[in-house]
Image (spheres, rainbow, N blue to C red):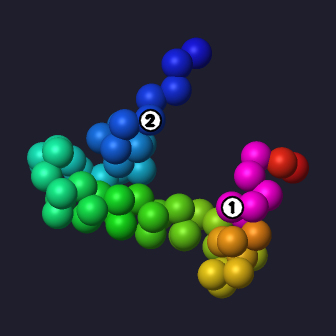
Amino acid sequence: MEIRTTLEDIAREYGIEVRTLHNALYDAYLTAQIFQRILWQISKFGYSTVNDLIYLAKKGGDN
């Protein structure tokens, strides 16, 4: 199974409309939109602070 990891693929997975690509400002906008949706998802599990994000980043894929 191939996992698609382009900015466009990830944005569309989160339901974000992609109007253009490879434009620094718009790519940054898409990245921010994706980040906001990820924050919303992890908040459901009780993570809500920067320290929580650092913890999750260090934890990686461990369960």
Which residue does the image show at 24% across and 55% down from the upper left? Answer: 27
Image spot of residue 23 (x, y percent): 13, 52
Which residue does the image show at 66% across and 84% down from the upper left? Answer: 49
Q: Residue 59 lies in magenta, yes or no?
A: yes
Q: Is residue 62 left or right of residue 19?
A: right
| Residue 49, disc | none
Q: Is residue 34 left or right of residue 26?
A: right
Q: Main secondary structure of the magenta part?
A: helix
Between 61 and 44, the one nearer to me in the picture: 61
From this view, report whether residue 11 is shown above or below residue 52: above
| Residue 5, disc | 2
**Residue linked to disc 1:** 57
Between 50 and 12, the one nearer to me in the picture: 50
Image mark count: 2
Asked whether the viewer can see residue 12, the reply is no
From this view, report whether residue 45 is shown above or below residue 19: below
Which mark lies nearer to you, 1 or 2? 1
Tell me which numbered mark, 1 or 2, is placed earlier along the sequence: 2
Look at label 1 and name its amino acid: Ala
Image spot of residue 30 (x, y percent): 29, 58
Which residue does the image show at 68% across and 61% down from the upper left? Answer: 57
Which quarter of the image is occupied by the N terminus? top right
From this view, report whether residue 48 is shown above or below residue 22: below
Between 14 and 4, the one nearer to me in the picture: 4
Look at label 2 and name its amino acid: Thr
The stretch of residues the image draws in magenta is 56-61
Q: Neighbour class for label 1 at 10 Å: few (<14), some, many (≥20)?
A: few
Q: Is residue 20 left or right of residue 46?
A: left
